[in-house]
Image (cartoon, rainbow, N blue to C red):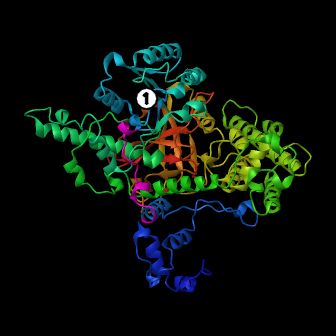
Amino acid sequence: MCDLPGYKGFRDYFQDNVVEWKTFYESKEPHKEALPGNWNSKQQISRELVISVLDQTSSLRRIRNFEVANITIGRVRIGVSPLVTDFVISKLGQKFVQPPPFDLAKSYADSHACAPLIFVLSPGADPMAALLKFADDKGFSGDKFNAISLGQGQGPVASKLITAAVQNGSWVVLQNCHLAVSWMPSLEKICEEFSPENVNPEFRLWLTSYPSDKFPVTVLQNGVKMTNEPPTGLRMNILQSYISDPVSDPEFFSGCQGKEVVWEKLLFGLCFFHALVQERRKFGPLGWNIAYGFNESDLRISIRQLQNLPLNQEPEVFGMHENVDISKSLQETKELFDSVLLTQGVKEGAVEERRQMTCSTISPRISSQKNPALASDTIATLQTHLCRSLPKDFDLEEGLKKYPVVYNESMNTVLVQEMGRFNKLIITIRTSLQNLQKAIKGLVVMSSDLESVASSLLIGKVPDMWAKTSYPSLKPLGSYVTDFLARLKFLQDWFDNGKPNSFWVSGFFFTQAFLTGAMQNYARKYTIPIDKCGYEFEVLPCETIETSPEDGVYIHGLFLDGARWDRKRGILGESLPKVLFDPVPIIWIKPGKKSDFKDKPDYVCPLYKTSERRGTLSTTGHSTNFVLAFSLPTDQPVQHWIKRGVALLCQLDD
């Protein structure tokens, strides 16, 4: 950067005034702050470039010297999205960052009887209320307006409705076309038969669908397409509620004669709550584990109150800690950079056209580069390094000999089973890398799977082939490999040196088996039915420990998300500024009889394997992400931490 015009001497000034730049860097909104010194007055200086250079913790993964061990991941603290938004406003205008108001009448005016009107749905937006009101205004209500939600067995019913409406000039609404994939060819044929000669001019066919690659292309091309993008920000959400039906109807708004004051207060409260639950979705798993589709049927708010609300709101409005702004910026920046990567030409498919390609064109990414040979060398170097890093498979026969199945020690079985699970992943990784090397040399055909592996290695992403066999992880390639090797070392140390005093709980492939093993040991030791046993938890005031507990297990390696562990008071505490995750000391998991447990006003904190905080039920009946709920002491009401979205994580994303 210092070689660009206008930036001469920037490096020296930065080194001599680190304190000023540190203050600028740690500002909550650095893109609105003045640059230190006289750099702000220089017209050639690009504030966006300076902030981007300062943000050394970019989400883009760099591979330096082709060494996986050198792949470093940091945390973006500045947040690129607000900077990009301000840049777009300054260069292009406000209209490019705010969705235009939904104008159903204009779309209707552009249509005709032979052209279907297509609503492209988005989460949180439901056009049906507006469409019903519009149809009523146009005189298409009652028998002249027919709506049906598509699904199993609804195709023939929809066909009959369309046939009748074409003749009598009524309107037909087919909702959720994406749920009737098998009927889409029939819909395409019906629309192709529309012509001015056989269709009543008053007839309209309305379709609603989420984006789907199964939606008929011809219908999409010939139709009038609309989308009602949900508003962003607390102010815009409330405004959208107020200008939408039925609150926008003066007769409805003034319909509570004699109770205007109470009515308006209740209306305001419900609209505010609707906007709040919508906005919590922006914070990912910290807001809601699953982003529920809160629709537009909630109540609205008064414009007078709306005008007094700030345009930008603090996270405390949503009951969350100020650190969630950093989490939100991280997520938005990741999505932005992922979108940038999509422009680099990394895509899969068209295998038949590439089967005979040489190593210099093994993927679209390589062929699109100025130096394809360098890219293929990068893949080859990474492949060699990864193969050398992988240890030998675990010897399961030797494991069973050294750690046989013993009634009073279930951990022997846990260890051998874990070794078997990791063996499958080792074999998958090694085999794919070896086949990729052969494909680069032209010894085997470059399949779509190998093509995907090569593309993923180039952008520092875990290949899908590995992820299907792997434990859950959101880490990029370099961190994933480092974490994977650490897990293998944990099991190898256990095998070589015996059961550890404290278990790295994050290192297990199937954590539930380990917890069940600890419970079985206790139940068998004291001859208690296992269904009458449960867990109690105690966070110890230490990071290491020299002995094993008499009952239960010590575990370590967990992180608190949304809060921290107050080591002085031994309770949950508020997160420190700009510290997103807090390592938790050793935890003692103590099995016992459920009937002996005493109720405590503790926060029941869920433990997840990844920060995504959601998963699916596996064949064993366990969640692929949720592990266990821990009881942690607190001096705050439990609802306080629920609003904070506090959870324990086995691993971070970097």
| Rendering quarter of residue 301 | top left
The x, y position of residue 265, in whole percent, is 17, 41
Q: Secondary structure at mark 1?
A: helix
The x, y position of residue 511, in whole percent, is 61, 39
Residue at the image point whose x is 69% and y is 38% from the top: 468
Numbered disc total:
1
| Rendering quarter of residue 15 | bottom right
Which contiguous range is marked in magenta? Answer: 90-106
Comparing 256 with 140, the one in front is 140
The answer to whether residue 174 shows anywhere in this view is yes
Amino acid type indicated by mark 1: Ser
The answer to whether residue 584 shows anywhere in this view is no
Quarter of the image with the C terminus is: bottom right
The x, y position of residue 597, in whole percent, is 42, 34
In the image, taking residue 618 as reference, residue 588 lies left or right, namely left
Comparing 577 with 350, the one in front is 350
The x, y position of residue 613, in whole percent, is 52, 42
In the image, taking residue 118 as reference, residue 69 lies left or right, namely right
Residue 100 shown in magenta: yes
- 64 versus 251 height, above or below: below
Residue at the image point whose x is 53% and y is 25% from the top: 179
Residue 34 shown in magenta: no
In the image, taking residue 299 as reference, residue 71 lies left or right, namely right
Comparing 188 with 169, the one in front is 169
Comparing 346 with 578, the one in front is 346
Look at mark 1 in the image and give the residue it sits on.
Answer: 595
- 482 versus 618 height, above or below: below
Residue at the image point whose x is 49% and y is 84% from the top: 17
The extreme front residue here reads 197
